[in-house]
Amino acid sequence: MATLKDVAALAGVSVKTVSNVVNGYAFVKPENRRRVEEALLTTGYRPNLGARNLRRGRTGFVALVLPELVVPYFAELAGLVLGAAQEHEWNVLIEQTLGTREGERDTLASLGPHMIDGAIVSPEALEARDFGELAPGIPVVMLGEHSVDLPIDHVGIDNVEAARVAVAHLVALGRTRIAAIGAHPHRGTAAQRLAGYRIALAEAGLPVHDELVATALNYHRRDGAEAMARLLAADSPPDAVFCFNDLLAVGAVRAAVERGVRVPSDMAVVGFDNTEEGAYSVPSLTTVAPDKAAIARAAVDLLRRRVEEPERPPEHVRTPFSLEIRESTRGGA
Amino acid sequence: MATLKDVAALAGVSVKTVSNVVNGYAFVKPENRRRVEEALLTTGYRPNLGARNLRRGRTGFVALVLPELVVPYFAELAGLVLGAAQEHEWNVLIEQTLGTREGERDTLASLGPHMIDGAIVSPEALEARDFGELAPGIPVVMLGEHSVDLPIDHVGIDNVEAARVAVAHLVALGRTRIAAIGAHPHRGTAAQRLAGYRIALAEAGLPVHDELVATALNYHRRDGAEAMARLLAADSPPDAVFCFNDLLAVGAVRAAVERGVRVPSDMAVVGFDNTEEGAYSVPSLTTVAPDKAAIARAAVDLLRRRVEEPERPPEHVRTPFSLEIRESTRGGA
DNA sequence: CTGAAAGCGCTAACAA
DNA sequence: TTGTTAGCGCTTTCAG
């Protein structure tokens, strides 16, 4: 593998000149430039980015730390982050934490402060205060949970309002026993969505029945199915359900259908995330649609700004969302 | 950020000793070890992996090059590769090519031979011969398409046989007008699955009707829906369809249902990939289930062996698959 | 405009 | 057992 030195020797110039050509420095004698370019070609020189980075003190890598790639929301988001990062000439290192706190700690710790220029973290189990000690000196942008008190850049939607809108939609349909699936003791977003749910019910003058709030310790299809099974087994089952993500909703729909409960006539279902899966499922899923592309762009952008200017005050970017109304709350197929 | 030198100064020893302690070298005088460990702690030293790698000549990174993370099969596979790589202390850099040939070329080229120890590539548009020139000197393991003539490590299932088994299942159900969705002019796997489809029909003494073979230039849900719409609009529509991936199948089911065609009674559907989505869709999807964990493990393992021993003859690992029979070809819901 | 040389932080050969 | 030192390949003063 040819090095700068090899090229210089072949072209009969110093490494400096070669370096200048490679890095597009303007003032190089045309004759030298020509010879260097020729030598570059014949050697098939490729700069050693590791060495360059060591010298420059940056790596060209950012880490994207997320719970699980099998969760479509994260897969879609990851794809968008990859694209956004590419525009800033960043390569993305994806790390799965599997949602455990150790996973999230280890990941950030193991990369060390040297291999990455920064990290975009979508925390699940991680607590706010972990961040400081965890990634000392690593610029971090946080996704999802909104904790204004933390001095960390953050991007996400207004989860309370989004949940409120979703449940208000069910109310407007005339549903009165509206359940929620996805309550979770330690997840900030879960708490916020639950709050939105409660607000919507209160606004409608509907009581909050505790037995209609189903906990889900994971947000997979299976958990949604199990939660729905529990709700249906109760004395007076719900006539609608707001699920805290699309995966839960898909599982809930499946469990309902298996028991002969028709969606949406017997049971209206709203999800959250607007994954492509939900748009094609039968029935298609009404869902809260965060602007994922905006989230990805904002996160990468925020990270870039923080890298360039480490001392700037942390920023909280709120991205838009909409409610995507589909068959699971309509008459349709 | 503390360096080795800082630690050495603080502990009153040489960098060598500190390096020895950090790297777990056994023979260090206990007294020195103690002092170094203390200095390590008070400085909060973290090794600069970039520098270490520059010295060692390896990077600790592997690239996983795939078309799109929004495709659940790739998301699931990526998750498994991440896990398998972790066991070999590799970090994974995920690159999306968006299925274009340029994307695949650029990706491999841009990383350069220096930032990654190797690459696992799931090609879509890339042609066999591209590989040599593309990644000169980079150890590469190829996923998916099986091209024995290429001197490159490779892992995948027997696509011809898998397709044959899938279609034979439809035949056994008594279906006689069995369509295929997913024919593609340039994809090796598409050609193989089509071959398996033809073999199964031939074995059953069924004719191959060209109008029952639907092309799909992409393998997304939308493409499946469109293909199914075309098939249903024909004079004598099929009574079963074999889709070359689950996404196509999901789209096909949706298009059928929208037109009042019942699955499976009017139209049996088989997919390919065994994504979680298919297991929870309504009706749940019969599908060819490749052992994705085995693929991920084999790929990482093959890559490790190639990195260690660059001159070994290329290997072709064939991973197992099974046919997962669910509601879309059964009586069920 | 270009060359020589220092040095990013680390490992390893060689000495002591 | 530990210290000294030479690089890994690159960028970047500093001279010239």
Image (cartoon, coloured by chain):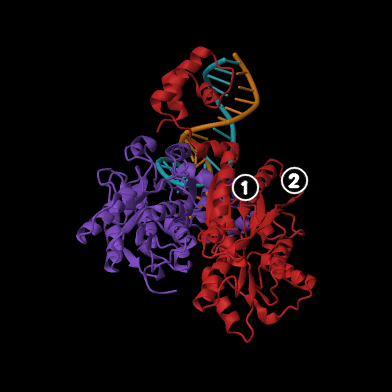
Chain colours: A red, B purple, C cyan, D orange
For disc 2, the marked residue is A311
Quarter the C terminus of chain A occupies:
bottom right
Residue type, mark 2 in image: Glu
Residue at the front extreme, as displayed = B235
Q: Are marks 2 and 1 in contact (CB under 8 Å)?
A: no
Disc 2 is placed on an element classified as loop
Instruction: Please give the chain letter of the residue carrying mark 1.
Output: B
Using the rendered view, name the quadrant where residue A304 is placed: top right
> Could you classify mark 1 by the number of other residues whose Cα lies within 10 Å: few (under 14), some (14-19), or many (20 or more)?
some
Left or right: residue A298 compared with residue B24: right
Q: Amino acid at mark 1?
A: Asp
The residue pinned by badge 1 equals B6
Decide which of A195, A179 is in the foreground and name it: A179
Position above or below: A167 against B317: below
Residue A190, horizontal then vertical, whole percent: 67, 68
- Give how far across and how far down residue A45 sits, in percent: 43, 29
Question: How far from the left and from the top, in percent, is residue B77?
Answer: 43, 57
Looking at the picture, tell me which residue is in the foreground, B214 or B52. Answer: B214
Distance of mark 2 from mark 1, alpha carbons? Answer: 25 Å
